[in-house]
Image (cartoon, rainbow, N blue to C red):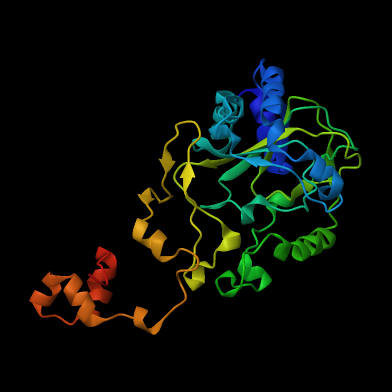
Amino acid sequence: MDEETRRIAFELAVKGYAVLDFPDAGFAGMADSIKANLHAHYDFDGWRTHGHAAGISLRVQDAWTFDENVKRIACNEHIVALLSRLYGRQAWPFQTLNFPVGTQQHYHTDSIHFSSSPERFMCGVWVAMEDIDETNGPLMYFPGSHRWPIYTNEHIGKCIAELDGTPTQAIYEAMWRDLVEAQGMQPEYFHAKKGQVLIWAANLMHGGTKQLDPSRTRWSQVTHYFFDNCAYYTPMMSDPFYGSIAFRTLTNIVTGEPVPGRVAGHEVPSRFIEATTPGQTKWREEDAFDPQLYLLANPDVAAAGVDPAQHYLQHGVREKRRLRP
């Protein structure tokens, strides 16, 4: 392992983030092209009139689908190879976000939005498209917070399947503030130069500071990466022990191909994904095991004349038998 890779690996392990220069000599031109191409997608006047004061931001998600330079940054072969080396599994980008101003986002961990099983096989790669200082909304983060446990809905006493409406990360923010206070954590701020990259680990607590000067811009791109041979889901939208899992439908931006979730090399069955889709799992009496339907779905069991419930428990579960025709 070369010294630069060793440095990045050490900092990512100890601090939860690492800084490097974007490994493409043409980055400045790509960044300028992206800014020109995406400018019309944002309501700058509306943001400066009321959005800034409200603490919100502007963003375009998945601009890689129509902007070749956004895709080129996301698919940079040196970044992909570096991440693959660091994590020991093949990395691939699945989402891009492009910001023309500061996010002004409460600090959070990506692990509630993007998670994997095994956990923590996800990271973010953020790159500055212009110089950033204390007045145009620098990133902030809490070094070492990536080593905390990953807290999900059960830790804050929420069953999302039984809540009205769609939850946001706001349901976690009080807990995050308490954690930071209890741990005595102090934030650091990234006053990035154009072309500087920040890699962060999945569970690093990070956010965007208030943009003190709303007349300025703060162009940046973040690309989120997963790694091969995992199951991928959104914990904030999931209650696994209540039968509700928000599995993610993902595309590898490099290949353009869908990526199925896997558990120990086995693809997660589509019927299981469908059955556990949030909103589909309010348990009903008619969902209970029906022996007659089981026999109709499995005529060989009916022909054998065995007890359907006993057969299902002893053999059907292991053989992944259908419960209904």
Which residue is drawn at the image coordinates 8% and 75% (left, top)?
303
Residue situated in front as seen by the camera: 153 or 184: 153
Q: Is residue 119 left or right of residue 229?
A: right
Which residue is drawn at the image coordinates 17% and 74% (left, top)?
296
Pick out the residue farthest to the left.
303
Q: Across the whole image, how many numbered discs are drawn on residues?
A: 0
Q: Is residue 126 visible?
A: no
Residue situated in front as seen by the camera: 30 or 120: 30
Q: Is residue 20 above or below residue 118?
A: above
Quarter of the image holding residue 153? bottom right
Residue 273 in the image, given as x and y percentages of width and height = 41, 59
Residue 298 in the image, given as x and y percentages of width and height = 17, 70
Q: Is residue 112 visible?
A: yes
Q: Is residue 98 above or below residue 325?
A: above
Q: Is residue 314 above or below residue 231?
A: below
- Position of the N terminus by quadrant: top right
Which residue is drawn at the image coordinates 84% and 40% (left, top)?
137
Residue 66 in the image, given as x and y percentages of width and height = 56, 31
Residue situated in front as seen by the camera: 316 or 191: 191
Quarter of the image holding residue 5? top right
- Position of the C terminus by quadrant: bottom left
Q: Is residue 170 above or below residue 11?
A: below
Residue 324 in the image, given as x and y percentages of width and height = 25, 72
Q: Is residue 150 left or right of residue 181?
A: left
